[in-house]
Image: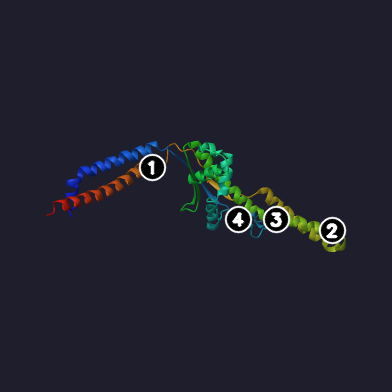
Amino acid sequence: MPDLFQLLQRRGRFLVVILIGSWLVTASVLWLMPPLYKSESTSVASSVVASDPARLFNPQIQHLYSPLGSSDQLDLLVGSGKLDTVYRPLVRRFNLIDHYSIAGDGQKTFQKAVNKLKKRSEVYKSDQGELKVRVWDQDPVFAAAMANALTAQLDSLHRDLLNRQNQETWSALQRASLRLEALRDSMPGDYAHQQGVYRQLIDQYALLLEQQPPAIHILDPATVSVSPDKPEWILILVAATAVALLVGLLIALWMERRTDYAVAP
């Protein structure tokens, strides 16, 4: 079996042809691929206690609340970035079926647009504990708009979840107040005090429902990129070179073995 130096001497031209061929093929494929621009927004999770009435109306603990959410809340936001529920409204709003030039109609075509948007998007947690939303597109302006829209959609989804419990509590207090009103004549002494408590709580929850605390605080909205992010020419060419060199060496070694067997007595 020849050593590497001998192999390169004998099959050097063959390896050069393999490398040049791989570069030409890879460069041709990369040239035909449309450039994609990346836009990214940076946010942090809001604390769930933002939807707690004590944050505004309890003087003893209102200053103890942090406006920033925990790591678990950030994980929930990242997990939501994998749900089709987040992407479907954006497909309709931005008419992505036409934007992505997807032929056909119906639910299958709509789902193809959802899947393509998910493939061209990324929602993840950075090492600094921030929520990152990335979108790639051939149009840099569109990529920035989609990244900001996706961030807003995540905020809307979790804002509704945070405020749904307050809505249910407010409705329950309203019903309890009406029931108490029906018992007004039978409890003249306690009615005024109890009804006052209900009215105070109803007003507090009504204020929170009107406020609609955000689930995400945007630190840096997505902006228009000036240069394409994909395809990564240098990285792909280096990988293609390594693969071509490995394959070429294996083929050259196989050819050397066949030659050795052919000349053996």
Whole-Å distance between the Cαs marked 1 and 4?
Answer: 40 Å
| Image position of 196 (left or right of 128) | right
| Label 4 sits on residue | 48
Observer-side mark, 3 or 4, equals 3
Bin the neighbour count of mark 4 within 10 Å (Cα to Cα): few under 14, some 14-19, many 20 and up. many
Whole-Å distance between the Cαs marked 3 and 2?
Answer: 22 Å
Whole-Å distance between the Cαs marked 1 and 3?
Answer: 51 Å
Bin the neighbour count of mark 1 within 10 Å (Cα to Cα): few under 14, some 14-19, many 20 and up. few
Q: Residue at x 20, y 42 (%)?
A: 13
Observer-side mark, 2 or 1, equals 1
| Image position of 28 (left or right of 195) | left
User: Which amino acid type is marked by label 4?
Assistant: Val
| Image position of 155 (left or right of 238) | right
For marks 1 and 4 on the same chain, the one whose residue lies earlier in the sequence: 4
Observer-side mark, 2 or 4, equals 2
| Label 3 sits on residue | 168
User: Which amino acid type is marked by label 2?
Assistant: Ala
Q: Secondary structure at mark 1?
A: loop
Q: Residue at x 19, y 51 (%)?
A: 258
